[in-house]
Amino acid sequence: ALLKRLFESAGAVPLSFEVFPPGNEEQRKKLLETVDRLTPAAAQGFSVTMGAGGTSRTGTYETAVEIAERTNRPVTAHLTAIGLSTNQAMETADALWSAGITRVLALRGDALTPNNQPSLSGFKYAADLVRALADQHRFEISVAAYPEKHPEADDLDVDIDHLEEKLDAGATRAYCQFVLDPSAYGRFLDKCSARGITADIIPGVMPLDGWSRLKRFAKKTETKVPLWLSRLFACGEETPELMPLLASAATVEQARRLIAYGAPELHVYTMNRWPQSLTLAKLLGS
Ligand code: FAD
């Protein structure tokens, strides 16, 4: 049944694309090209990240508004609580709402440095921010989920308790940290559904391009690298001409498997580049 669904669901699962605010005019032009190229495949629109500690608050706002005006697609603004007072966080949310950005991904965020303490006057956990957002406006609120558990959580069950708290506080969908082993997402969906969670749990897909960036991300987020992928990329290192082809094929393979496990949508981490994300979208039939 898994194999059957693997190939029959092409095009049936909507895509959303994650981008980050550009740092200068040249990067902005590149981002807008990426947005224009991906818009036809972006049934679930775009999401715009916010730098750790709220560092790109204005950039996130401006980018979200610009993409919404340009594409007429749903746009989700990430809002990270760490480093912001509750007032600053709520002012940012107000500005987004007034500009017509009604979808927010509510996050705690990470401290800028390991010794950095969260602002004492701010929200401690994402669930606290969700509660405040739900009271403030009729936002469509999303939250983060971690199929391989959040690095600070003692175990996955406790982490799912905290995911449930965020959903109970008013969030209606969860976007997952990317996984390199799609079966981790499958197991996570099973666990969530056994707990009675009915909200959409949407997996992230990172278009792969080779070893170096992937290793860095996997280490930072404690994402496991499955043996088949290590072997594939070892082969790519031996024969560099093959690496882009292997990486692209591996990305599509992962996406198809995530769909087969029941993904209601795929959230693609574009890194503000379009060729790999568009290749993935085309191969999935979007
Ligand atoms: P929370 O849900 O608050 O959880 C943080 C930790 O606290 C977890 O270990 C949880 O189990 C624990 N916890 C929660 N509630 C309680 C409680 N009541 N008691 C004890 N422990 C508790 N970061 C950015 O800076 N900018 C972004 O734009 C961004 N986008 C992201 C998008 C996605 C899809 C994902 C998955 C992550 C993103 N992140 C982003 C990273 C995120 O900010 C970090 O992973 C951060 O460490 C946790 O944020 P959270 O919202 O999941 O926190």
Image: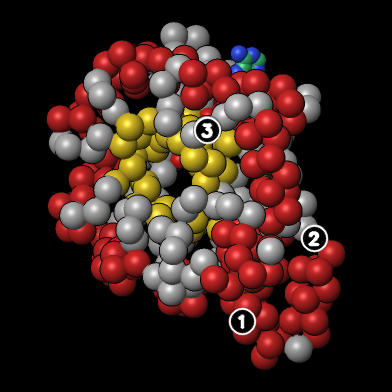
- First in sequence: mark 3 vs mark 2: 3
Q: Nearer the viewer, residue 217 or 226?
A: 226
Note whether ligand 1 is within 8 Å of mark 2. no
Judged from the image, the quadrant occupied by ligand 1 is top right
Residue 266 x/y as whole percent: 49, 56
- First in sequence: mark 1 vs mark 3: 3
Note whether ligand 1 is within 8 Å of mark 1. no
Image quadrant holding the C terminus, namely bottom left
Mark 1: which secondary structure?
Answer: helix
Marks 2 and 1 sit apart, C-alpha to C-alpha, by: 19 Å
Give the residue number, with chain letter if any, for mark 2. 226
Q: Nearer the viewer, residue 21 or 279?
A: 279
Give the residue number, with chain letter if any, for mark 3. 198
Marks 1 and 3 sit apart, C-alpha to C-alpha, by: 38 Å
- First in sequence: mark 2 vs mark 1: 2
Give the residue number, with chain letter if any, for mark 1. 244
Give the answer, above or below, for where 40 lies relative to 221: below
Q: Nearer the viewer, residue 216 or 177?
A: 177
Residue 9 x/y as whole percent: 52, 66
Is residue 164 in view from this perspective?
yes
Instruction: Report crowding for label 1: few under 14, some 14 to 19, many 20 or more residues within 10 A (C-alpha).
Output: some
Mark whose residue sits in front, 2 or 1: 2
Q: Are circles 1 and 3 on residues that touch, CB within 8 Å? A: no
